[in-house]
Image (cartoon, rainbow, N blue to C red):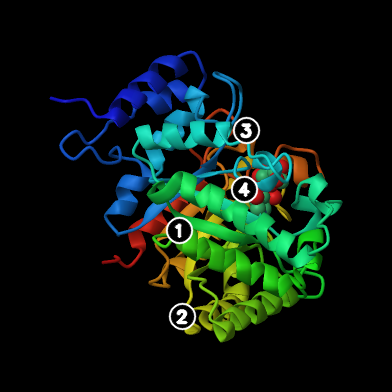
Amino acid sequence: MAITRREGLHALAGLATAALPGASAAAATLADDASTGTAPAGGLQALAATRGLRVGSCFAWSRPDADRGSFANPAYAALLLRDCGLLVPENEMKWQAIRPSATRFDLARLDAMIDWADEARLPVRGHNLLWHQPKWMPAWEETHDFGANPSRAAHDLLVTHVDTVCKRYGARIRSYDVVNEAVNPADGTLYDTALSRALGSPQATLDLAFHAARAAAPHAQLVYNDYMSWEPGNATHRAGVLRLLEGFKARGVPVDALGVQSHLVTQGVDARASVQALEGEWRRFLDAVTAMGYGLVVTELDVRDNALPADIAVRDRAVAEFTRGYLDIMLSYPSLRDVLLWGMTDRYSWIEGFEPRKDKLPRRPCPYDAAFRAKPMRAAIAAAIAAAPPRA
Ligand code: 9MR
């Protein structure tokens, strides 16, 4: 029987993880469905496939065997190969990573990641073509000299960026976060950057990014991605995103879907009660988005275990129940087909550095713990998928 490439990668991941606690067990349970060459039985993606869904995660680049959430870390790769049907580079497609100057691109790391995903037969989403905030543009951009015809220079700078990425990867990338986090959550207005000032307005800049992406990647799903969420304090952000989406429709801008990042924050031990309290307003938002004809993608799911006691069992249960309630709602929208996690294991999650717990205990935001053991959150994701209405 022929060994698929994915099986080969599994075998490599298994061998190399044997020395790592927890990971060896994960790798040992990998069993490709050799008859179809599809995702391994028992993995989240195998389950998702039975519902016409895909599950995925972000991943990183690193040197071989670095202790990172990278394809080159066999322990992490084993999780990706076991559970994922879709991947997204966490940082390596951002302007800060690939655009060291106005005239240069550095795509070596991104190339390596996409090559690895291809070998594993795992599709990749693009994140992102424009993170439209001064803070997240490369430093040179904010002081860039746009010359005598700034709007032409800004147009070329942006279109060159979109063209370079989209044309390099072609049909290998079928979904892009074209624009990321352009709405200021404080007041719902659009951020300005040096680029948008040169181009004339933020609106013109975002529109151009989408038009350029449609032209350069006509096969791809084009997504506006943001973190407006369902917890209290997000109403202004949600309203701003709705206004932006309405404007895209009115102007005929080619945007296919809203990327709902889904960086969730638990509200207390009784997660079911939290879900009940949040569901109504959240559905009103999602209904408004889908009524305009936009699809939905869960692009960056993880959970900040706030308002929960130190006890790990209590925390993990509340996180799992909150995740389950959230995914049940999201999966009730038929256009939602892809659910991506912002990392498979607590070990590499960005949350720890962003907002540590007040009691200084390590955060537990992902489906696997820091020793690569499956947590109740993983079971909750599986249960939500199993209960999802099947897609065609
Ligand atoms: O997880 C990412 C972290 O490693 C980076 O330092 C940070 C800045 O580039 O971006 C994080 O990912 C963000 C994503 O790109 C957009 N949505 C919010 C994510 C978490 O901050």
What residue is shown with label 4?
Answer: 314
Residue kind at label 4, given as amino acid type: Val
What residue is shown with label 3?
Answer: 347
Report if the CB atoms under discs 4 and 3 are less than 8 Å apart: no
What is the residue that sits farthest to the top in this orientation?
Answer: 19
Label 1, label 2: how many angstroms apart (C-alpha)? Answer: 20 Å
Secondary structure of the residue carrying numbered label 3: helix
Q: Which mark is residue 217?
A: 1
Q: Say whether disc 1 or disc 3 marks the residue closer to the N-terminus.
A: 1
Residue kind at label 2, given as amino acid type: Gly
Residue kind at label 3, given as amino acid type: Arg
Label 4, label 3: how many angstroms apart (C-alpha)? Answer: 20 Å
Quadrant in which the C terminus appears: bottom left
Nearer to us: label 2 or label 4: 2
Q: Is residue 319 left or right of residue 46?
A: right
Q: Say whether disc 4 or disc 1 marks the residue closer to the N-terminus.
A: 1
Q: Say whether disc 3 or disc 2 marks the residue closer to the N-terminus.
A: 2
Report if the CB atoms under discs 2 and 4 are less than 8 Å apart: no
Q: Which mark is residue 359?
A: none
Report if the CB atoms under discs 1 and 3 are less than 8 Å apart: no
Q: Which mark is residue 293?
A: 2
Q: Is mark 1 within 8 Å of ligand 1?
A: no
> Label 4 neighbourhood size at 10 Å, few (<14), some (14-19), many (20+)?
some
Task: Give residue 62's position: percent from left, percent from top.
Answer: 59, 26
- Whether residue 274 is visible, yes or no, is no
